[in-house]
Image: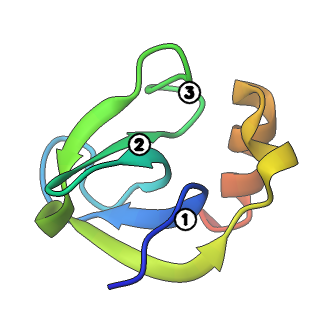
Amino acid sequence: MQIAKGTVVISKAGHDKGDFQVIMSFDKNYAYVCDGKFRPLEKPKKKKLIHLKVTNTILDEKNLQTNKLIRSSLKLFNR
């Protein structure tokens, strides 16, 4: 499983199951994800890596600067 900052993931568990989110940071067992709406940059969600399905998409660093840019980038996946 290849993960990096900006990787788009799908939540496999929890109240946000099925939602697209982006990884902001990570460590050995956890990732901090946000979606720009319910989980803004100021308060990312701490999720276990086993509860995330990694996609092959990594967002550019400039798309991770504001909540609005994250929402608009993830909107392409929610269609």
Vertical order, 64 against 56 (above or below): above
Q: Earlier in the sequence, mark 1 or mark 3?
A: 1
The numbered mark at residue 63 is none
Say which residue appears at 66% left-offset and 55% top-offset: 74
Q: Earlier in the sequence, mark 1 or mark 2?
A: 1
Q: Secondary structure at mark 3?
A: loop
Q: Secondary structure at mark 1?
A: strand
Q: CA distance from mark 1 to mark 3?
A: 17 Å
Query: Which amino acid is tagged 2?
Result: Val
Work out which residue is located at the far front of the displayed protein and give it.
28
Query: Which amino acid is tagged 1?
Result: Thr
- The nearer-to-camera label among 3 and 2 is 2
Indicate left or right for 77 with 60 as reference.
left
Question: Measured from the top left, where is residue 39 in percent x and y?
Answer: 44, 27
For the C terminus, the image quarter is bottom right
Vertical order, 52 against 56 (above or below): above
Vertical order, 21 against 39 (above or below): below
Question: Measured from the top left, where is residue 10 in percent x and y?
Answer: 37, 65
Q: CA distance from mark 3 to mark 2?
A: 12 Å
Query: Which amino acid is tagged 3?
Result: Lys
Work out which residue is located at the far right of the displayed protein and give it.
62
Q: Which residue is mark 3?
A: 37
Q: In the rendered structure, are the residues bearing label 3 and label 2 in contact, judged by CB atoms less than 8 Å apart? A: no
Q: Residues within 10 Å of mark 3 (few under 14, many from 20)?
A: few
Q: Which residue is mark 2?
A: 33
Q: Which residue is mark 1?
A: 7
Question: Measured from the top left, where is residue 63 in percent x and y?
Answer: 81, 46
Say which residue appears at 42% left-offset and 16% top-offset: 43
Q: Residues within 10 Å of mark 1 (few under 14, many from 20)?
A: many
